[in-house]
Amino acid sequence: MRVRAAIGAPTLPRRAAGYAAAGAMSLYLLVKVVWIALEVRHGTADWVLLNAVTVVMALAGIGLGLALAQPWGMRLPAWLVVPVVWISGGFLVSMLPYLVVSSLLAPGTPEPAGEPGLPAWETVFIGAGFLGMALALVVGLPLYLRDRWPWAFAGRAADRATDRATDRASGRASDGAADRAAVGAGAGARTRWIMVPPAALAVLWTYWAAGGTAGLDPSAPRTEGADARLLLADSALCAVCGVWSLWALNGRGGARTPSWLPMALGFVASGSLFAWGAWKLLWLLPPGVYQPAEYRWLALAEHVVAVGAGLAMLVTLVRSTRPASARS
């Protein structure tokens, strides 16, 4: 990915969003550090490794916020920035619909007797950390990406699809009209095939969110509450947004659809599929650590497909939004 960006002072909204993201994630980091210290002190270090992983993720989130707010963030190499931005957005921005809807619903079942919940300050810090980081990224990430890769957000999706087809044809002028048509059809067919896995996941998650039980393990702990269904519906929504973004960037989303809309939605949706799929796989691979609601083999296949679909969607998005002069 070739970068041609003017290095200048970030705008006030970008600076504010970046510092807000770093501050919000600092609250979450503080809770995790306290947990690790207490686990080590009390000799109950079973969760130290997992909490250490989340500490590293929190530090990466703080670094991302500072990079959004500071001029040196524009000078970071793309291979370092894009994965952090992609995964952070996938983890947090994709959860905003769930966080908004769940906050409007009545509180869930109270904690059972003898199983006290988190202290109030920890609950507040964790909630503020996640929600604050997600909201800050919604503002800061598009501004940063627009400033650094402006061509990815310019123009209309249908015009981009036409330009790509023209670019492919002109680059293969000696191959003849039939070959040019085959190249264009092949590119469209590849995009359509890439839509299939996220579309299948969207159908599966929507079915479970609506109360379907096929594929669920009867011996697993039941997670049929409103919260579990909301999470499934949120995942399904992300998958649908990802499919639509590819469809739109392939010239099928309407003549007036601006490029930034499918680009932004596809970026977050693909990051969500990859990040949450990989995170759940980390829990599933060690035997006996986590019991999913679905059959274990189905859960493994489901999240492997999500990881692969997220990666394929990202590659397709990057290719579809590169300027013609940057294509080889």
Image: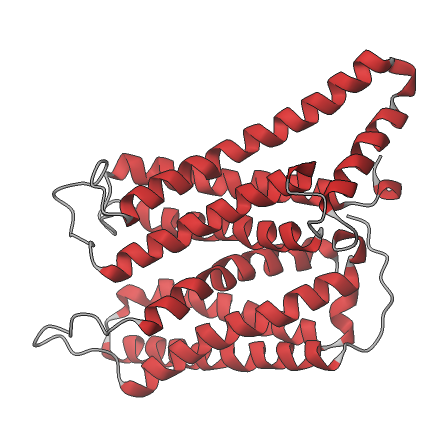
Left or right: residue 317 versus residue 244 is: right
Left or right: residue 322 versus residue 95 is: right
Q: Residue 231's x, y, as percent? A: 34, 57
Q: Quadrant of the C terminus?
A: top right
Q: How is the image coloured?
A: secondary structure
Q: Residue at x 23, y 74 (%)?
A: 107
Res 299 quadrant in image: top left
Q: Residue at x 36, y 52 (%)?
A: 233
In the image, residue 114 sits, relative to residue 284, either above or below, namely below
In the image, residue 203 sits, relative to residue 44, either above or below, namely above
Left or right: residue 226 versus residue 174 is: left
Q: Residue 238's x, y, as percent? A: 47, 51
Q: Residue 259's x, y, as percent? A: 71, 51
Residue 39 in sight from this viewpoint:
yes
Q: Nearer the viewer, residue 203 or 217?
A: 203
In the image, residue 147 sits, relative to residue 319, either above or below, namely below
Q: Residue 35's x, y, as percent? A: 33, 77
Q: Nearer the viewer, residue 54 or 228?
A: 228
- Residue with the most extreme right position: 174
- Residue with the most extreme left position: 113
In the image, residue 199 sits, relative to residue 19, either above or below, namely above
Q: Residue at x 29, y 86 (%)?
A: 120
Q: Nearer the viewer, residue 244 or 220?
A: 244
Q: Nearer the viewer, residue 244 or 136?
A: 244
Res 297 quadrant in image: top left
Number of numbered discs on residues: 0
- Residue with the most extreme bottom position: 121
Left or right: residue 236 versus residue 248 is: left
Residue 33 in sight from this viewpoint:
no
Q: Residue at x 43, y 80 (%)?
A: 128
